[in-house]
Amino acid sequence: MTVGRFFEDFNIGEKITHATPRTITEGDAAFYIALYGSRFPQYSAHQPAQLLGLEKMPIDPMLVFHVAFGKTVPDVSLNAVANLGYADVRFITPVYAGDTLFVESEVIGLKENSSGKTGIVYVHSTARNQSNRIAVSWKRWVMVHKRDISRATGHNTVPELPSQLEASELPVPSHFKASRDWHRYSGSKKYAADYKVGEIISHGGGITIGDSDHMLATRLYQNNARVHFDGAHMAGKRLVYGGHIMSLCQAMSFNGLENALWIAGFNGGTHANPSYANDTIYSASVVLDNQHLPGNINALRIVTFGSKKELAGCDLDDLADLSLAQKLPEHIVLRWDYWVLMA
Amino acid sequence: MTVGRFFEDFNIGEKITHATPRTITEGDAAFYIALYGSRFPQYSAHQPAQLLGLEKMPIDPMLVFHVAFGKTVPDVSLNAVANLGYADVRFITPVYAGDTLFVESEVIGLKENSSGKTGIVYVHSTARNQSNRIAVSWKRWVMVHKRDISRATGHNTVPELPSQLEASELPVPSHFKASRDWHRYSGSKKYAADYKVGEIISHGGGITIGDSDHMLATRLYQNNARVHFDGAHMAGKRLVYGGHIMSLCQAMSFNGLENALWIAGFNGGTHANPSYANDTIYSASVVLDNQHLPGNINALRIVTFGSKKELAGCDLDDLADLSLAQKLPEHIVLRWDYWVLMA
Amino acid sequence: MTVGRFFEDFNIGEKITHATPRTITEGDAAFYIALYGSRFPQYSAHQPAQLLGLEKMPIDPMLVFHVAFGKTVPDVSLNAVANLGYADVRFITPVYAGDTLFVESEVIGLKENSSGKTGIVYVHSTARNQSNRIAVSWKRWVMVHKRDISRATGHNTVPELPSQLEASELPVPSHFKASRDWHRYSGSKKYAADYKVGEIISHGGGITIGDSDHMLATRLYQNNARVHFDGAHMAGKRLVYGGHIMSLCQAMSFNGLENALWIAGFNGGTHANPSYANDTIYSASVVLDNQHLPGNINALRIVTFGSKKELAGCDLDDLADLSLAQKLPEHIVLRWDYWVLMA
């Protein structure tokens, strides 16, 4: 299994059961707080979570995502040239300490590149808990090396991928209540009605990354892609796992999005430029949409950016235009488009 | 909430409920051991804690303190120029894995500085558990920027702060027993009667700090002060959270204070000089007082120093004089005056 | 206790009860995954462990070993010049989150070196759980400084140490089943019958070590040997705890030894050369033996190497010869000879 799969090793419709199911514990949850410093109350204490109708504090959905994603790496992306994108990411059933994740992927698309050297693999991955309920499902596509560049595979199947989740199709956890008393836990009275579409929110001071930080994170997720760990192989510059940047930005986003209660799904995510140790990451968000859901719940569509330089002045103003732009400037390392639930 | 409060935003008597209550778990406790390497048996295993009359191993009071302190940072000290001091710190009810801390602060003093640019804010902070019992309470004062230096506030209220806790007023946990069988867990038979007032104890080899260590710690405590995280902002030198040094010194102090059973309170604490990554911290303590409490419990007043150079010879001998001195030499980064219970 | 024991402080037959019993929790288990990224299913989730007949996921035996070993350091090896070796290491009763380890050592040999400056101390150490069952026992020998080099001790007792454990004497956990369905958790169908004696297995990409990583690990194990922590004392080069390298290699060995179910014991271990921060560690293993045990369990004798350079070509081929060689090349930092159980 050391070498991973090449493009030729995938077949449309194939289902891959990924190795190493994972019981997530309070130990993982504490470690996650230490990695990012997130201050969202619902992942920090039982009582706020219970105000939302949850049984106790859930595992942060981003920790669930990283662990589930990590399981797919040995089978899907060990030979990846690049992770090209995510779509249709849905957080369906909250995960609690003690739950076990079992992850599988279905190959939903294969397209050989015109160079003949690589191909794009599209997978639909699903993480289920021990009761067979879906915790999170997602689609992603990666560029993978071919084993034999002299033989064309003829693969040319590109699945239809939604450019966004509609607010009406967002999963809402069972018994979920969007409480208007949330400010006593979050410290902010800015609720959904106070956010304007187009509003730009700076999330404040940056966080400098160290190699130990991102490697501890990526190992916690049991993601074994060599580029993150082998400094000799990478000429001294280990690549930071893109999800690490997402979680850093999510944690910083508490400054300005204090009342975000639950990440319901991602519309997409782009790791626009690589990050390395000693980069300082700043974050800011744009409110792209603001919708009512049944049960007095609101859904805000947020695009959160991670940047290697502090976002102020023009750089901050530009984010509205960059929310849906094709090309992103060099200092932007992450553009992440997702829905949060809010009262 | 990004910008934090300025001096003008505080009012005498105001009570601030801090955001993000925190359930402390076995995950936090394990992480704390990894950060400092503390070998005190009562925080390492259930059986020693039960010999003390506790139900199981408590969370290290210093971890409780850091988490509780971290909650106050966004409201109290995000715009702090300096943390000036602590007084009257009392550890009242032990915290166990699964307990949740809720933290609030009352503004007990406000004094504008003569420069007109800053003022001193005095707060009395209290962390309660889910049963509304006080886990720890403390007073601290910080120098905070004014928003508008052109307008005087007229604030000139300085609260009375005790220079020390009397032994007779130290909180002792319910059912606490100071066992004389403790040496079978601690490895040392040096009990309270064997410590002389004025005795100086070197705690041995030092520990070198890395940026990842102190940032992981400070994030675990959900303390979001920018100076600890943003290397670009700090010209590459992220400031180590002062409490990180306290915990390093506490862990080292097991060499020589093996039978310290419980930190009952602090008389005061001074972060005399800043610490940065690559500093190696050494520690030594002076016994300032030794008192009998009811129930065959003794209380030792200890002043523990953290130093950037190894403490030997004159530097060690000088500590007795420095225990209560106004001015501290440059290599001293911490002077911490507290009471421990011992058999 | 700061100074540790010198050679003269040990007596044949003496039993040392080590300080600080340790309750191992899910927090420790999560931290261990973050340190090494191990993907063995039996330590990652409850369900695979139950397929093996265990009650729930056990603590990784190597974490148990490091914690137990760490307890012996203050009493045995604080003044060690060198850790010379291990023998007869047996993992007898699995440890689960919530169990407490109590560790003691018996001095089984003392031999003064001809120089008169140092001596070799042989200990038999045992870690028991709260029910007095042996979790792990081991023998090791260390070279220790004498206090007084002018006086000969006359010690010349060398215990008989087995060069290996026989397959027939390997401890197998109660109710242990070596399942042939394991591949649905491990992702590999290569079972014991598929391994040939003499086979060499490369474990793939390397992992670069940072000072924060190894110090966090060594503190988690409450191992307080100064050489790992005090950068000033070590002229900037803190020595990596040898057990850290073992665990890195164990984690990497999942690539190729996916179906290893349990480490039953070590035959020996050699930390052939020191490791420091920024070293990248690669790993490969040689299959030395392959035996049937009762109950459809197989035992593979594995020699795992840790190397500072990538092992390919001749360097990889040479490992078979190096498995039992006296002298090891400079790039080899670890040679570790142990038995794993497999279906």
Image (cartoon, coloured by chain):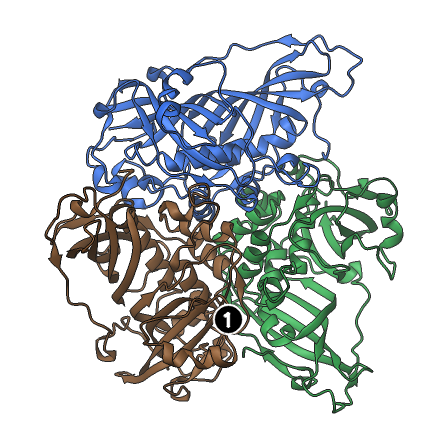
Chain colours: A blue, B brown, C green
Is A115 drawn above or below residue B200 in the view shown? above
Please indicate whether residue B113 sits to the left or right of residue C133 in the image: left
Indicate the chain on which mark 1 is placed: C
**Frontmost residue, C284 versus A190:** A190
Q: Where residue A44 appears, x then y in whole percent?
A: 35, 44
**Occupied quadrant, residue C116:** bottom right
Is C8 drawn above or below residue A126 in the view shown? below
Asked if residue C69 can be seen in this view, the reply is yes
Which kind of residue does numbered mark 1 sit on? Thr
Q: Secondary structure at mark 1?
A: loop
The quadrant the C terminus of chain B occupies is bottom left
Please indicate whether residue C12 sits to the left or right of residue A150 in the image: left
Asked if residue C134 can be seen in this view, the reply is no
Q: Where residue C109 appears, x then y in whole percent?
A: 74, 80
Q: Which residue is mark 1?
A: C20
**Occupied quadrant, residue A54:** top left
Q: Where residue B271 appears, x then y in whole percent?
A: 36, 63
How many numbered callouts?
Answer: 1
Is C216 drawn above or below residue A279 in the view shown? below
Residue ID at (56%, 53%): C212
Is A179 drawn above or below residue C307 in the view shown? above
**Frontmost residue, A217 versus A287:** A287
The quadrant the N terminus of chain B occupies is top left
Q: Where residue A61 appears, x then y in whole percent?
A: 42, 34
Neighbourhood count class around disc 1 (C-alpha, 10 Å): few under 14, some 14–19, many 20 upward: many
Residue ranking furthest to the bottom: C151
Please indicate whether residue C156 sits to the left or right of residue A163 in the image: right
